[in-house]
Image (tube, helix red, strand yellow):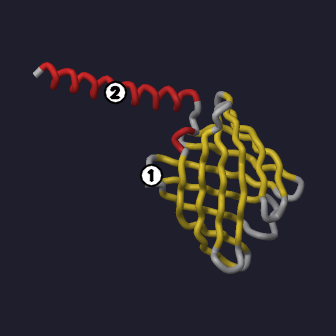
Amino acid sequence: MRQSLRVATFVAVSAISCFSATENQAARDPLSALAGRWVGLATMTSDSGDSEFKCIVTYTRRSEENGMRQTLRCENGDSFKLQAATDLSVEGDRVTGLWQDTINEVGGTVDGKVTADGFDVQLSGRFFAARMAVAGQGCAQSVRVLPQKSDMFRELAATLKKC
């Protein structure tokens, strides 16, 4: 009986500690819920029509400060490939950082805000500028990129799953 009570107490304390640690991490870094590997389909809308392809987005926590490294890989197997990385720093409700498209060798800065379920940022660079909104809750995430003055595409929208 005493052993059962000790085990039950241990389980209860462990569960509360885990919940508190997760809550504390989320309070320190509001993007922590995005951590992990997300897979799904994306649609790119252009003047010539829609193209669909597979995307993998990975978020890795930054150990030295609040924030994430987001890597985005999309391809349709034939003619389209996108490989980009975004380093995000979070301070309060501000998101800042750098982005780079490794295939086209372009990059720039990130500036925006934390939202209730992700972030909304402006990607600015010499040859490309866009708004990117990421929203995730539980096992589902959406990524939406709206370029400004792009000849390539009007919108990139991805629906991703983690679970």
- Return the x and y of residue 68 as percentages of the image width and height: 64, 41
Q: Is residue 10 above or below residue 44?
A: above
* Residue at 65% across, 49% down: 70
- Residue occupying the far front of the picture: 3
Q: Residue 92, labelled with which disc?
A: none
Q: Is residue 12 left or right of residue 105?
A: left
Q: Which residue is mark 1?
A: 139
* Residue at 53% across, 61% down: 39
Name the foreground residue: 139 vs 93.
Answer: 139
Query: Which amino acid, by three-letter code, is at mark 2?
Result: Ser
Q: Examine the image and state in which quarter residue 94 appears.
A: top right
Query: Which amino acid, by three-letter code, is at mark 1?
Result: Cys
- Residue occupying the far top of the picture: 2
- Return the x and y of residue 87 as percentages of the image width and height: 72, 44
Q: Is residue 104 left or right of residue 73?
A: right
Q: Which residue is mark 2?
A: 14
Element carrying mark 1: loop
Quadrant of the image containing the C terminus: bottom left
* Residue at 87% across, 58% down: 127
Name the foreground residue: 80 vs 36.
Answer: 36
- Residue occupying the far right of the picture: 126
Q: Is residue 62 left or right of residue 11?
A: right
Q: How many marks?
A: 2
Q: Is residue 119 above or below residue 94?
A: below
* Cβ atoms at labels 1 and 2 below 8 Å apart: no
Going from the N terminus, do you reach mark 1 or mark 2 first?
Answer: 2
